[in-house]
Amino acid sequence: MLCEQKKRFFLNFKCLSGLIMISTWIPVMAILVASVNGGRSDNDTEPCATIRIWSTVVHLGSPVSATCVIRKNCPLVVGQAVQIEWRLGSRSVPGSPVANESDWVSRVVLSSFNHTKAVLTCGIKATSQIVAGKEIQAGYPPEAPQNLSCQTNLTSPNTLTCRWDPGLQETHLRTNYTLHTEIWGANMSYTYKLPPGVHHYIIPRSDFLLFSDMSIYVKAENDLGDATSEPVTLEPVSAAKFDPPEIERIEVKSRRFGCLKLRWKFSRHQEWMCYKGLNLEVRFRVAGSNQWSDPPILVDWVRPSRAVEQCCLLHGTEYSTQIRVRYLQSPWSEWSGSKSAVTLETAPAGRLNTWMKVSMNHTSKQLDIQLFWKPSKQFLANSQNVWYVVSVQKQDAGRRKLCHTSAHYCTFQLSARVKKLYLSAVNGAGKSPLNEIWIYPNKAQSSVLDVAAVPHDNRSLLIQWSSVVPSSLIGYVLEWKPLLKTDLSHIQFEILDQNQSSLVITGSLEPYKPYRISVYPRFKDGLGPPQTVNAYLRQKAPSMVPKIQIGKIWSSRVELTWDEIPLEERNGMIKDYKIFYWYDKGPVKVVVADAEERKVTLENLRMEFLYEAFMIVSTFGGSLNGSTIHFKTEPFDVVTIAVILISSAVGLTLLIITTYMTCFSKKKRLKGRIWPAVPDPANSSIKIWTSEYTQFIHVSWDKEEPNPIYLSHLSFLDLTTKLSQEKDENWSSSTEHTSDLGESVCGSLFIPGYSGSNSDSVPYATVLFSSPGNSPLPKEPHVYLRSESTQPLLETEESFSPKCYQNVSTKGTPSEQCFFGPCNDCVPEREEDPDIVWDDFPFLRALAITDSEND
């Protein structure tokens, strides 16, 4: 029997030891410990061990001490050495034997208990068996409840609701609250217990009196102590929050300008309330405005049966009115519903702020005028319906009215001779004083340098500008208008003095909508040109991306264009356009186009490649991607092909023209320019012989008809000494064979640069002179040398040698001459000169030089 009990206890403690290691099972472990401590044999009525502790609820952070005592006849330790082990949760803590006690008693001291809840156990170290345990809680005593307040509800059913704050510090312990009330003079008191965590209570109507004072307080209690709030003394009706009252009607008394009389009543649940001490607050606002009068108007000691009159209101103005009520110092009721009424009207008072735009109409030769006005701070319309009259004359009689409108602007034409206008406000009770407006032409003088507009907050823009302030500057006019609304009624303006350089504009400004802001310099005698800027209150990405249009395509370039984004779709200032493009497996490239441009040319593309591209449009508030397009480059540039074709056509045309003119033209000058004419010695003549002509002689371009017979080359040589007979014989006898022209004349050492037949020279003949060509005829005869050229002299060359000709001398000249061409002998003949027939000797005739030619 004893063995079975040991076995059962051993199993229970083993399970408990395993659970002790898991912190989430600590409460379960405590229950198991209690069951183990209660584990007994059939005849055993005492626990195996006990833990003695001063209190299981302690202050958080305070020291804790406990003692574990094991019963000597505990079946778990019979016959074993006892050593007690302490644990706080799963953590081992050191213990010590108690002095003058056996090993079966151990004590532990925790210097600071920092857990809000933990299990302290003791067990036998040898077997790790837990024999006793205690759960310890730690926390703080409650704080006194704060901010106790009670409010009476007079709506059926009547109740009194009290609320309080439990305090800032968490107690970590179960804290109970009780609400205590005591009615003075009635000897009635009540106590209300609240569930944990509840900090309000509704007292029923049977437990309080509306018009009797009562004392109320709250008490908080837990295991470490209690605390009580400050008591509150009140009369329940003075703590009542009434239902919103009701305005029955608003009356307007005749001859009571600026006054309204209100009649009101309680709601049906508080109609019985007729006591004195009621307070009323009244607030007004002008119809169409969002601003209520602040502070509201307080009216003391009112009764529902008496009307409330309010004066000092604007004349002829519609007001919306609300009221609220309370009793003495009770909370104010909610505001009543609105009622509207119009005060009695009077004539408008005060002046209007005006400004004018003037331009010349070149068609009608008159001035186009746009006049704008708005109420000044001193202006009072004093009526619901106000009209504005613009006229030329000041007097009523014969006044010429230019405008009669309820708007705040007027446009008209006037002669340039008119210098002044008059503006007045009119209602049913009268008219305002006249506003005198001078007409000044625009000035070219500018003083505003630049204008900047930035968002000030979500509903306003900050406008700043800089300027040069001349002596005649008296201020500025700041104008702003929405670009999407063209009606002049949307134009707003502000008149500023010369010391201002910034202004915050508010009003009905919308985000993502463009506004145009202009600053005009205002001079004594007119307005200067404005500086203008566009602005947005807020910006975001555009609502659309324009479609890319493919323009011209070349082999390595493509032109892309797109339309302008509509103004209403931009949602901000366009910053730039980015074109992303790529070909298959190629890198992505990007081209950025300026915001003002709507086209771009993609360069350095691959020939005959398929490309993809898309656009990103960016504002200063975001970006939007467009759809993708495809395009393919051309194999050849159209421009290049066109240039090649045009160049080929032009070149072919020039070639044909040149060939035709060369081959078929009758102009000898052109033909002679292309190639030199081959002279015919038999039909040649020499007109002028000078020593300077040592170059190729071409046909003169200065004459209309050049000499058709000329020599292609003439070499002139002046001989200062007379050739001796011996030299002539040597010179004549040293001949060499040449081409089919026959034997040529021997080369002469007196001719510079002449080397005989082996030379590349082309002269056909060389004429030697003993004196310049312009001098009188010498007595000695001229000497002619035959050319060494192998080029035929004529177009058709005879295969035979030329005939032998003799030089025929003239009278007075020696008859000894060498022959041209071969001859049997070259012995001079001495005989009388016969008459010479020159037609029989054409070659010699060509070489003849007469006196007239020399002249």
Image (tube, rainbow, N blue to C red):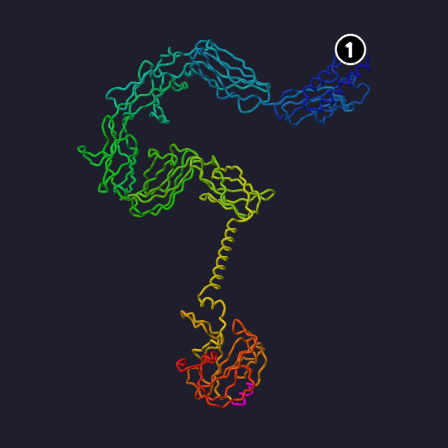
Number of residues whose C-alpha sits closer than 10 Å to that of mark 1, classed few (under 14), some (14–19) or many (20 or more): few
Camera-side residue: 51 or 197? Answer: 197
- The reply to whether the magenta stretch includes residue 502 is no
Q: Position of residue 22 (x, y in %)?
A: 70, 24
- At x 25%, y 22%, the residue is 256
Question: Residue at label 1?
Answer: 42
Q: Identify which amino acid the numbered label 1 is placed on.
A: Asp
Q: Main secondary structure of the magenta part?
A: helix
Identify whether 459 is placed above or below 787. Answer: above
Q: Position of residue 154 (x, y in %)?
A: 42, 13
Q: Is residue 25 left or right of residue 803?
A: right
Camera-side residue: 286 or 57? Answer: 286
Q: Secondary structure at mark 1?
A: loop
- At x 41%, y 85%, the residue is 776
Q: Quadrant of the N terminus?
A: top right
Q: Which of the 4 quarters of the picture holds residue 581? A: top right
Range drawn in magenta: 724-732
